[in-house]
Image (tube, rainbow, N blue to C red):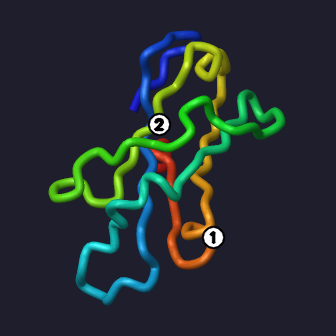
Amino acid sequence: MAIYKNQAGQKIAVYVYDATTASGTDPGKTGDAANITGEIALDGGTSAATNDVNPTQLEATDHPGIYLFDLTQAETNADMISIRAVGWRIDNDKHARDGLDG
């Protein structure tokens, strides 16, 4: 996924999964957008809340657990962007990975 520097209208995906899901089933957590917020850090700087208060769920059936954060132009004005999904459910038994992980 490419993120272009200093460009508005971009999105970044995070994957939220339920660590308590039974083995052999898809652990992607759906219907949880209202409980997820984001923290962003630019160029290794101080973390702050993302402009997009809650992400949008991509599609629950075919992409369970994928949530999209809309990025402002200012949020892309960096050489390195780090996004972390946060929320009380994530901290307890849900986990998130950003779309930049290999």
* Secondary structure beneath label 2: strand
Q: Which mark is residue 69?
A: 2
- The disc label shown at residue 79, or none: none
Q: At label 2, which amino acid type do we have?
A: Phe
Circle 1: is it few (<14), some (14-19), or many (20+) Cα within 10 Å?
few
Dividing the image into 4 quarters, which one contains the N terminus? top left
User: Residue at (56%, 39%) from the top-left corner?
Assistant: 53
Q: Residue flagged by tag 1: what amino acid is it?
A: Asp
Residue drawn at point x = 51 percent, y = 60 percent? 96
Quarter of the view holding residue 41: top right
Q: Residue most toward the bottom? A: 22
> Residue 25: x and y, percent?
24, 80
In the rendered structure, the answer to whether residue 76 lies left or right of residue 102 reads right
Q: Nearer the viewer, residue 44 or 7?
A: 7
| Tags 2 and 1 touching, CB below 8 Å | no
Direction from residue 1 to residue 8 in the image, left or right = right
Q: Which residue is mark 1?
A: 91
- Residue at point 45% right, 44% down? 99
Give the answer, above or below, for where 5 lies relative to 95.
above
The foreground one among 45 and 89 is: 89
In the rendered image of this protein, does residue 66 appear above or below residue 75? below
Determine whether the residue tagged by mark 1 lies in a helix, strand or loop. helix
